Amino acid sequence: MSTAQSVRMARAAAADRPLVGTVGISHPDRVIYPDQGTTKLALAHYYESVADAMLPHVKGRPLTLVRCPDGIAADGRADTCFYMKHSKLWAPPALRRVRIREKTKTGEYLVADTPDALVSLVQMGVVEVHTWNSTCDDLERPDRVVLDIDPGVDVGWPAVVDAARQIRDLLGALGLQTFVKTTGGRGLHVVVPLVPRADWQECLAFARAVAEALTRSDPGSFTMQFARAGRERLMLIDYLRNNRTNTSVAAFSTRARHGAPVSVPLTWRELTTKLGPERFTMATVPARLRRATSDAWSGYFEVRQTLPPHAVEALNRM
């Protein structure tokens, strides 16, 4: 154990803070999810338990965080929560900082590379972890495209599953391998891993072309309208997740909603109309990982593919 870790452990003990890893958790009995009675300490233990599965999807990436220092509201709304994009003057030492050029300034972001870093996020009051589509080592070239299926309030789960399969088949026809995960809400993410070669504009144009192709082919199911009013029965394919500095919720992140739902990678085989997203929560996901005999996204990090030449033109002809 390093000297710095020893010092942190000693300070935590002195403050009578329970340790999760080497991180002392203040206010451990604070209730984060009122409907579950889930405490801050329990949330810290959750992130410790899923760290091995979560870190490959998080480490080395700039983060945007949803902080709920006092927990979510009793009615399940996240009114007590707020987004934190840039790091403040102080952050736990387990978290790395990276300075990133933005349009008119330079912003400082946090990066979580270790289990203690994930637990430190909880200590900061974080409930949701969102990541960039690129890594700190190659900020201007994304290593994935995320297609976010955002259903209107009257769209059922079977339609969302069908939409994900349509995207899989559409991109499969272009020779692209895709992966799917729940969002922790009512939607799904279809993720296209990439060798980081295309820039942000190319990835955004590709994602938009996918959304437009689906909307042209089935305007009764899909829309390009971002405003929720008027699209209650339609699904938006949110291509703007692929803008520079925009983010998507990380695999295994909890969400600031009743039930403590979690964004979970799935195999295409297990994505069925019977497997609803409400099954995946902070209470059930650790057991799912313990039972698993293989990674649901086995092979994801070994995929070597790039956006096909003229892919946007091909999609525009569909």
Image (cartoon, grey):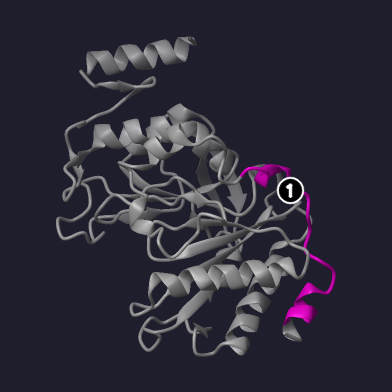
Closer to the camera in the image, 11 or 191: 191
The amino acid on which the numbered mark 1 sits, given as a three-letter code, is Val
**Circle 1 — which element?**
loop
Quarter of the image where the C terminus is located = bottom right
| Residue 201 in sight in this render | no
In which image quadrant can residue 133 be found?
bottom right
Position of residue 92 relative to residue 257, above or below, is: above
| Residue 183 in sight in this render | yes
Q: Is residue 220 left or right of residue 304?
A: left
Which residue is pictured at 39% across the width and 36% down the height? 286
Closer to the camera in the image, 149 or 277: 277
Residue 50 at what x, y percent from top left?
44, 35
Q: Is residue 113 magenta?
A: no
Which residue is pictured at 53% across the width and 74% down the height? 237
Number of numbered tags placed on the structure image: 1
Q: Which residue is mark 1?
A: 303
Q: Is residue 304 magenta?
A: yes
Which residue is pictured at 43% across the width and 71% down the height? 158
Q: Is residue 41 left or right of residue 56?
A: left
Closer to the camera in the image, 133 or 90: 133
Q: Residues within 10 Å of mark 1 (few under 14, many from 20)?
A: some
Q: Is residue 316 left or right of residue 109?
A: right
Residue 31 at what x, y percent from top left?
18, 42
**Residue found at the very far right of the displayed protein:** 309
In which image quadrant can residue 289 be found?
top left
Closer to the camera in the image, 148 or 173: 173
Residue 140 at what x, y percent from top left?
70, 55
Position of residue 1 relative to residue 88, above or below, is: above
Q: Which residues are magenta?
A: 298-315
Residue 118 at what x, y percent from top left?
43, 35
